[in-house]
Amino acid sequence: MKKLLLAGLLTVLAAKPAMSQDFDFDEMTYTPEVTTFKLFAPAKAKGVKVRIYKDGQGGKPLKTVTMKASSPGQEGAVWTAAVKGDLMGRFYTFDTGHGETPGVFAKAVGVNGRRGAIINTMNTWPEDWCCDQHPVVKSPADLVVYELHHRDFSVARPDVKYPGKFLALTEPWAIDHLKQLGVNAVHILPSYDYGSVDETRLNEPQYNWGYDPVNYNVPEGGYSTDPYDPVCRLREFKQMVQALHKAGIAVILDVVYNHTYDIEHSNFQRTFPNYYYRVGSNGSGCGNETASEKPMMRKFMIESVKYWYNEFRIDGFRFDLMGCHDIETMNAIRKALDELDPSVFIYGEGWSAGQCALPAERLGVKANIPQMPRIAAFSDELRDALRGPFDDDTKTGWLGGAPDCEESLKFGIVGGISHPQVDMTKVNYSKQPWATEPTQMMAYVSCHDDMCLVDRLQASVPGITKEELIRLDLLAQTAVFTSQGVPFMLSGEELLRTKQGVHNSFESPDSINRLDWQNLKRFPNVFKYYKDLIRLRRDHPAFRLGNAQAVREHLEFLPSPPCTVAFRLKNHAGGDKWNTIVVVLNGSRQPQTVTLPEASYESICEQGAFNLNGINHFTSNSVTVQPQSATILHDCP
Ligand code: CA
């Protein structure tokens, strides 16, 4: 305690005028004697003020203090005010003449994030927080990522204590489910403070994914048990991280720096009009687009991810519409995180949702992944080859028997890298391999966007029966989880989740978005298949080589009939105990036979069921795979 206070005091004393670029977004520094406020705002602003309040909303200011520009830069200046007295427990806003704002980097806020809050950070530490440790991740290839929305995951769980809250992920049923399934990384949909759920009306049904950031550096109040108490949301978020870490599960944060809900009311705009945006451009498809290439926006993003890592022990970041950010910024973020911990995983959507104001060659799009080492992007090649194109839910892919998808599947299976047996002229979206290493490719068939897998299969495969649906669901995930990319799944797919055909459920009610936990009992074999598939991957390094050269050396495609893809992982790939592993994916409605090197084999997966100890032992130079299913074999010495 003493040490911290002294450090805070020294910061205040050492606050010499500096260039605005040196400003590290410490907008509020508390000591019992004086609280110092700083804000990066236009140098020419007039009457910049900070107001102190008793509560997070309502009431008149207790104090209004005029700020002074202490370090004028070219465009911006750092405005400063020192407010004497002990402000612990108070709230504050800045005002540069465009409406009150908690600033751009508030670390604690009142209800709905309207005012910054002065709290004692130590009160946000759960018991034993000091002992919390990041799970050890040797390579991103070892990760199995599970993407969840807090409310979807827990709101309809019969035995839940904290439905829809951060704390739901501390409950034994939640941890048990994740551990049983075998995932080791949870990617949480936006969990910073967002605007579309009114935190003063949490007793009413409200739902949103949360891609409408308000305060980027504060957990969302709607997921806490008390959004009025600024300590509560921070503490409960940390309890969630702690519980997941104790179970060996990494926590990946979905970060949405590319846009804000609107420009007019955003904290960026109220603090420094037009600075943080590419004004007039809408690369996010959400009405506006931030300007990562501007020095202080870039710095904001860097400081923000560092803060989430340091303060909340976040293990990885998923960049929403990474294709809106410039390459230089993404690499600067990678570098800044490397200085803290090189095992922090970074991936993003390698596209934008509209035309960005920067030229494509400067942007963090998929094609530029070779210029962004150790940053991964989602493979829409694999996703759409499996389920069909993103722009038409009624069209199918390989799963529904569409022709000429095999090469795109192969591209996904090798992890998006260059491979002598993948003919890029036949791959759906990319004519060049874009991953330098397989750990730069996210392998997936569904995520929160678009239809979930069950709905897509129902929409795109005419007359599909329940049995066929299950077969194709399991087959799709087998392609994903045997890929050399980093496997990723949408929460609830293991329960045959349906969103009743809703394509974009960002504000749909719980009845659409919630996981139906009864499906665990209805479809126990589906859950078991997912579990065994994940276990296969986690037990066998051959599926997660994590290195392009090793993939080219050990992964060999076998000749196979149309609508099938067959490959083997040979010569104890990655030090695997099995010498050769054969995977045959059959998307057709007929049994298909694939020729193998003559050997003695043990099958571990056939006809939609696993037995990792072995199903069938046989000696042959071929294998016949049942319709719409995968067969996985290993050879026997
Ligand atoms: Ca909020």
Image (cartoon, rainbow, N blue to C red):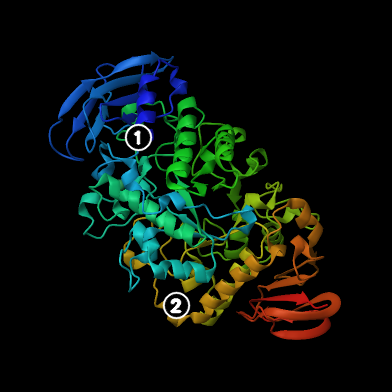
Q: Residue 330 at what x, y percent from top left?
A: 56, 37
The residue sitting at 71% across, 48% down in the picture is 433
Neighbor class of circle 2 (other Cα within 10 Å; few <14, some 14-19, many 20+) is: some
- Mark 2 CB within 8 Å of ligand 1: no
Relative to 549, say whether 482 is above or below: below
Residue 123 position (above or below residue 61): below
Name the amino acid type tagged 1: Lys
User: Is residue 194 in view from this perspective?
Assistant: no
Q: Nearer the viewer, residue 227 or 509?
A: 227
Report which residue position mark 2 lands on: 520
Q: Secondary structure at mark 1?
A: helix
301 relative position to 106: left or right? right
Position of residue 60 measured from the top left corner of the image (x, y, whole percent): 12, 32
- Drawn side of residue 63 relative to residue 36, left or right: left
Q: Position of residue 600 (x, y in %)?
A: 82, 81
Residue located 18% across and 39% down the image: 55
Q: Along the polypeptide, which appears first: circle 1 or circle 2?
A: 1
Q: Is residue 414 above or below residue 454?
A: above
Q: Residues within 10 Å of mark 1 (few under 14, many from 20)?
A: few
Residue 490 locus on image (x, y percent): 49, 62
- Image quadrant occupied by the C terminus: bottom right
Q: Which residue is mark 1?
A: 2
At a point 44% along the width and 82% down the height, the residue shown is 522
Hey, what amino acid is under mark 2? Answer: Leu
- In this rendered view, identify the residue nearer to me: 228 or 210: 228
Camera-near label (1 vs 2) is: 1
| CA distance for labels 1 and 2 | 52 Å
Q: Residue furthest left?
A: 59
Observer-nearest of 17 and 185: 17
Left or right: residue 559 versus residue 129 is right
